Image: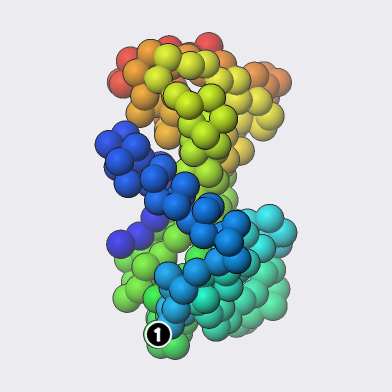
Amino acid sequence: THILESQQFNREWLEEEFFPLVKQMKRRAALGGSTDLSGKRMITFFYEPSTRTRASFEIAMYMLRGQVIFSTESARVFSSVAKGETIEDTIRVLCGYHPDVIVLRTDVEGMVAKAAEFSTTSIINAGDGTGQHSTQALLDIYTIQDEISKIAGTSVAISGDLARGRTARSLAYMYAKYPDVKIYFVSPEAARIRDDIKDYLKKHNVWFA
């Protein structure tokens, strides 16, 4: 199972499985962690530099007693990618080390989905060029639920470089799963949200401005 985009999740899964699981994991983390992922192996392979996302994945893995068996950032410079290796070959090589999951950040939209086609293990999208950052959207939607105890019927303002902001795009897709919500996009003209998001919101009758 891969985590590639916000559209793959539904409201029922978020409310019945994801939110309760996160609350459970937060309690365990407060008590010093757990052994839920004991024996599990993770690779973090980032084509772009990262602080928060990479640290969050790796620290969480350690807290759950799993292993980070290989980790790199700026992979476009500091890996065989610099010598022209394709994403297909890179993923095949990484899968040869038998990880349980590969956390992948790329600088090209669509590359994570392409990697998933060739992977024999689970791929988690940790940022996909100007595409999506679906795990960040999961964190955002949980935080909203945790802070105000509801999502349906609420309003959110999403600002910044919306044309290229993968976190903004992913949150818009995630927020659209709830009824009676309003989304305000705030950006300069040159950085307006792209038409694919607008078309999706219109199709699902989500109010936006």
Colour scheme used in the picture?
Answer: rainbow
Under circle 1, the secondary element is loop
Mark 1 crowd level (few <14, some 14–19, many ≥20, 10 Å Cα): some
Residue on which the image places disc 1: 98
- Residue ranking furthest to the bottom: 97
User: From this viewpoint, is residue 81 visible?
Assistant: no
Residue 134 location in percent, x, y?
Answer: 47, 46
101 shown above or below 201 = below
| Picture residue at 60% right of the left edge, 66% below the top | 32
Amino acid at the residue labelled 1:
His
Report x, y in % for residue 61: 54, 70
Farthest front residue in view: 31
Q: Position of residue 177 (x, y in %)?
A: 35, 28
Residue plotted at (55% across, 83% down): 69
What percent of the width, then of the height, locates residue 78? 69, 78
- Tell me which residue sits at (47%, 47%) in the image: 23
Q: Is residue 176 left or right of residue 203?
A: right
